[in-house]
Image (tube, grey):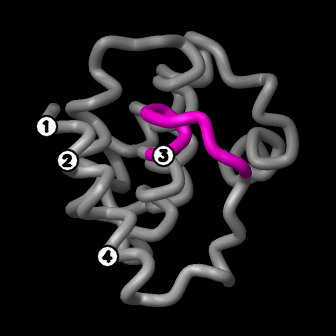
Amino acid sequence: MMDRIAELIKHPEYLDRDTLYELRSTLALYPYYQTARLLMLQNLYLLHDPSFDEELRRAAIYITDRRVLIIIILKTRLIISPVSLSNINKSQALSVLERAYIIIID
C-alpha cells in the first residue's frame, strides 16, 4: 500500500471509487495514518461524496497539523488563491479557522 500511497500523492488524478475503498480499508487498519486520511478526504471531495463533511470533522481529531485541514476547508468552501503552508503562522491559522468555522456554520 505504501507504493500506492506515494503514487496517489504524485498523481491525485488517479483518485476514484476504487482508491476510496482502498484508503478506507487502510484507515480501518491504521486509523492514525495521516497521509491516507488526507488522501481519503481529497478523494471524497473529488467524488462529491456526501460523507465529506463528516469525514472532515473526524479528520480534525487525527491530523496533527490542522493547517492542512484549513487548506482543505478553504478549497471546498471558497475560491481562493493557493496558500503555502509555510507562510501561515499560528495566529493566521487560527484566524482562518475561525472564519472557516463561521462559513461552515452558516
Marks 1 and 3 sit apart, C-alpha to C-alpha, by: 14 Å
Q: Nearer the viewer, residue 50 or 82?
A: 82
Marks 1 and 4 sit apart, C-alpha to C-alpha, by: 16 Å
> Residue 87 location in percent, x, y?
66, 82
> Residue 19 location in percent, x, y?
61, 23
Q: Nearer the viewer, residue 56 or 14?
A: 56
Q: Looking at the image, which residue is at 28% across and 20% down?
A: 51
Q: Which of marks 4 and 3 precedes in the sequence?
A: 3
The reply to whether dot 2 and dot 1 touch (C-beta < 8 Å) is yes
Is 89 in the magenta?
A: no
Label 3 belongs to which residue? 74
Q: Is residue 95 above or below residue 27?
A: below
Label disc, if present, on residue 105 of the rendered structure: 1
Is 76 in the magenta?
A: yes
Q: Which of marks 2 and 3 precedes in the sequence?
A: 3
For the magenta stretch, what is the residue range?
74-81
Label 4 belongs to which residue? 94
Mark 1 secondary-structure assignment: helix
Marks 3 and 4 sit apart, C-alpha to C-alpha, by: 13 Å
Q: Residue furthest left?
A: 105
Query: Crowding at label 3, few (<14), some or many (≥20) Cα neighbours within 10 Å?
Result: many
